[in-house]
Amino acid sequence: MSVKILIRRKFKKEALKNASAMLIKARTNAMGNQGYISTETLVNYDDPQSVIILSMWQSKDDWDRYRDSDTRKEHEDKYADMFEGSTEYEILRVGM
């Protein structure tokens, strides 16, 4: 069953100019993984520091495998100082 991963991030104000490049790199990393379908990036209209990434995967197992990959962990570690607070994750099933 397909899943969507909702990722909430708040970027530090001084990191906004580099946020786009970071998000593109994250998407590129995900694209080569089994089960990846798509990613959508949504920026809060009134608060551009608040970003939601909505990533779609063929299964939760595919997401889990990517989430736990060394490539993703390295990417997250590299850019951790760009974020204000912690990243929130929510896994959503597609359909009932």
Image: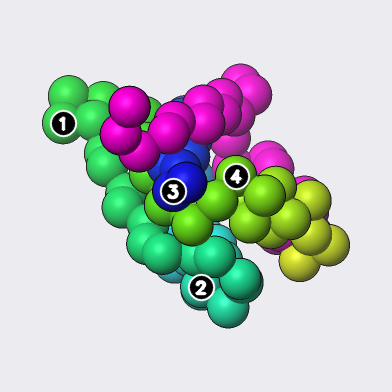
The answer to whether residue 44 is above or below residue 63 is above
Which label sits in the foreground, 1 or 2? 2
Circle 4 crowding by C-alpha within 10 Å: few under 14, some 14–19, many from 20: some
Residue furthest out toward the right: 70
- Between discs 1 and 2, the one toward the N terminus: 2
User: Which structural element holds mark 3?
Assistant: loop
Residue 31's tag is: 2
User: In the image, which residues are magenta?
Assistant: 72-96
Q: Which residue is disc 4 drawn over?
A: 60
- Between discs 3 and 4, the one toward the N terminus: 3
Give the amino acid type for the residue marked by disc 4 in the picture.
Lys
Instruction: Name which quarter of the figure residue 33 lies in.
Output: bottom right
Which label sits in the foreground, 2 or 3? 3
Picture residue at 73% right of the left edge, 55% below the top: 65
- Between discs 4 and 1, the one toward the N terminus: 1
Q: Which of the two residues, 88 or 56, is positioned nearer the viewer here?
A: 56
The residues tagged by marks 3 and 4 sit, at their Cα atoms, a distance apart of: 7 Å
Circle 1 crowding by C-alpha within 10 Å: few under 14, some 14–19, many from 20: few
Q: Which residue is disc 3 drawn over?
A: 2
Instruction: Name which quarter of the figure residue 94 lies in.
Output: top left
